[in-house]
Amino acid sequence: MTPEHVFLLLGAAVVVYTLTGGADFGGGVWDLLARGPRKDAQRDALAHAIAPIWEANHIWLIFLVVLQFTVFPKAFHATSVALHVPLTAALVGIVLRGAAFAFRSYGFDTITWRRTWGRVFAVASLLTPICLGLSLAALATGDIRWDGVRVTSGFFVGWTTPFALLTGLMTAALAATLAAVYMTAETEGDLRADFRRRALGAQAVTVLLGGAVLAAAHRDAPDFAAAFGWQPLLPGTVALGVTVGALVTDRPRLARFGVAVQGVGVVAGWGLGMQGHLVRPDLTLHVAGARPAVLEPLLPALLIGGAVLAPSLWYPGQSHLSRPPAVR
């Protein structure tokens, strides 16, 4: 394998995590924002949809991290040092939301405790994708500097820019959009109508924030903006129209396909904008530490690991698909 092949694998892991784990984060956002006479039914439907497979989705984040520190140790060093604050916050958020979801479902059976853990789950679900978005944006700014041995730019560069903040907010909005669209296929009747309205609103917010991100990139990440992969925007725009049209005409499966294509387009655009860099401007794919002794056995190792892992992912997926639909 070559460093370019590994970069594509990293991108594929980000795509899968966005479409699966991102939707789980979005479910927590809608748990936080549940309103109206059917708010309890909305939360029950979200929990029903999330429960079988949600923690398994983090396997893709683990895969991404392990692959990076194995193949690109210098990039992992730079990322983990320069982005120590937002990545630690994201990790704490993932742990808190997982624990809170379990305690809310199986812990003390009192209204007070259920509400407390529910609030922890919801707030952590909102803050975690924001922190992950901050981190991805920081890699593109060019503010993180590497002198060949260590990071020289400190702990608070890149991820504190307006570009990074807007990217974090857009990441949370995209997660909420994914979750709401997915939930239209999990519910019927009044609940489906609730999630359709939320999906359309979240989609509008995501588009507005996406435009703001591109505008801010020209100031805070000019090299990234100049190299940005505009090619995915055309299929992404078509997918946006398909998603909105499918939501308006109540075709949830088509809407789910459309929003998934949007997620792929966002990640592909970011990958093209990085233009062969793992951390702009100093760590390219060929400077980040990849060694032939690691690259050569990587494909067989991934195939063996995939063969072991596939059944454990297939089983909860089948359990989810074979269950009755969520609350109607």
Image (cartoon, rainbow, N blue to C red):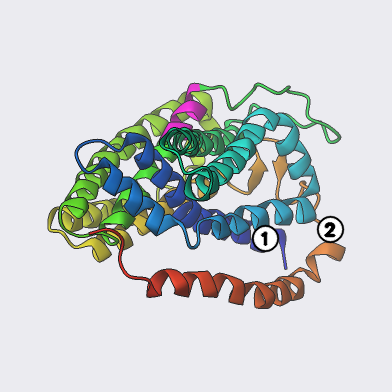
Locate the N terminus by quadrant.
Answer: bottom right
| Along the viewing direction, whichever of 261 and 219 lies nearer the viewer | 261
Answer left or right for 140 relative to 325: right
- Look at label 2 and name its amino acid: Arg
Q: Residue at x 83, y 63 (%)?
A: 294
The tag earlier along the polypeptide, 1 or 2, is 1
In the rendered structure, which segment of residues is drawn in magenta? 162-169
- Place of residue 95 in the rendered image (x, y in percent of width and height, measured from the top left): 61, 42
Q: Secondary structure at mark 2?
A: loop
Label 2 Cα crowd, 10 Å radius (few <14 / some 14-19 / many 20+) = some
According to the image, label 2 marks what residue?
291
Q: Nearer the viewer, residue 284 or 158?
A: 158
SS at mark 1 in the image: helix
Quadrant including the C terminus: bottom left
Q: On screen, 263 above or below 79?
A: below
Q: Which residue type does callout 1 highlight? A: Val
Q: Position of residue 270 (x, y in %)?
A: 50, 45
Q: What kind of secondary structure does the magenta stretch mostly adopt?
A: helix
Disc 1 + disc 2, Cβ < 8 Å: no
From the viewer's side, name the closer residue of 107 and 286. 107
Is residue 166 a member of the stretch shown in magenta? Answer: yes
Closer to the camera in the image, 250 or 326 = 326
Q: Which residue is mark 1?
A: 6
Do we see residue 133 in this rendering? yes
249 to 166, vertically: above or below: below
Say whether residue 85 is left or right of residue 106: right
Cα–Cα span, label 1 and label 2 = 12 Å
Residue 98 lies left or right of residue 188; in this view the side is right
